[in-house]
Image (spheres, rainbow, N blue to C red):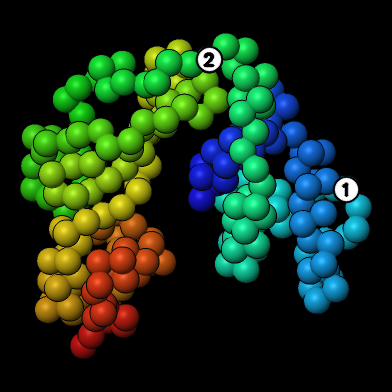
């Protein structure tokens, strides 16, 4: 979610310079947005122009177990902010050409699905490319429907793959887990996920029966 929030903040003009968030501007806009809500939830704002601590925690690399309520609040705030095209120009100094798949290089790309037998030979394609500051954010999709995200930095290096969505291979995995009596934690670990993400992905796929406790 942090990556998504940074993308939105960038498009809304909340960056002072490349990869530098303008906390002062965010604070002013966010406190204005919260002005009527603090009457009902005093803890979400303090009436100053400072960015609330809970909002800053959503943008930290370490990650925090922030309640869902704050995510919903921050997402609604971002949705109500207008796109500021001028900000993009100030940050980049010059317009960027639309990214093309041919610019990515590194092909053939690897599938990182831990549930398929031969991920090194899976067919992988690019489904989305967009700029995040000077870098490219690339979403890959494998033939098994597993999706992941990598960033291509301005120096040409790639970040590690970050899970985005699982796909159909999770259906048979969960079916086997139930049949063999695996615990939820083991089922998630074998899929390379935590239990919360596994349940979210199962719900997305319409899977209603998932392991909850270890069976005897």
Q: Between label 2 and label 1, give the one nearer the viewer.
A: 2
Hey, which quadrant is residue 136 in on the image?
top left
Residue shown at the point (61%, 25%) measured from the top left: 88
x, y percentage for residue 196? 41, 66
Q: How many numbered discs, if any?
A: 2
Identity of the residue drawn at 72% across and 27% down: 16
Residue 64 location, quadrant: bottom right
Query: Do we see residue 187 in this rendering?
Result: no
Residue 49 shows which numbered tag? 1
Q: Is 186 placed above or below 96 here?
A: below
Q: Secondary structure at mark 2?
A: loop
Q: Quadrant of the C terminus?
A: bottom left
Q: Which residue is mark 2?
A: 95
Image quadrant where residue 94 sits? top right
Instruction: Left or right? Give the position of 202 relative to 90.
Output: left
How far from the left and from the top, in percent, is residue 29?
78, 47
Say few, some or many: other residues with alpha carbon within 10 Å of mark 2 (under 14 / 14 to 19 / 20 or more): few
**Residue 81 visible in this rendered orientation of the protein:** yes
Q: Secondary structure at mark 1?
A: loop
- 21 shown above or below 133: below
- Name the N-terminal-most of marks 2 and 1: 1
């Amino acid at each position: 979610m942090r990556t998504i929030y940074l993308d939105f903040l960038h498009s809304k003009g909340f960056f002072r310079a490349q990869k530098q968030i303008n906390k002062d501007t965010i604070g002013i806009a966010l406190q204005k947005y919260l002005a009527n809500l603090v009457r009902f939830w005093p803890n979400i704002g303090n009436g100053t122009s400072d960015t609330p601590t809970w909002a800053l925690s959503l943008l930290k690399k370490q990650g925090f177990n922030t309640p869902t309520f704050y995510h919903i609040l921050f997402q609604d705030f971002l949705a109500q902010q207008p796109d500021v095209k001028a900000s993009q120009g100030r940050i980049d100094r010059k317009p960027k050409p639309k990214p093309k798949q041919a610019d990515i290089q590194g092909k053939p790309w690897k599938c990182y699905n831990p549930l398929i037998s031969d991920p090194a030979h899976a067919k992988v394609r690019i489904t989305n490319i967009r700029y995040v500051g000077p870098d490219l954010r690339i979403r890959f999709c494998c033939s098994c429907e597993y999706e992941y995200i990598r960033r291509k930095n301005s120096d040409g290096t790639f970040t590690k793959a970050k899970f985005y969505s699982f796909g159909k291979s999770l259906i048979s995995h969960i079916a086997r887990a139930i049949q063999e009596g695996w615990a939820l934690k083991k089922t998630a670990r074998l899929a390379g996920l935590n239990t919360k993400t596994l349940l979210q992905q199962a719900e997305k796929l319409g899977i209603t029966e998932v392991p909850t406790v270890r069976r005897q």
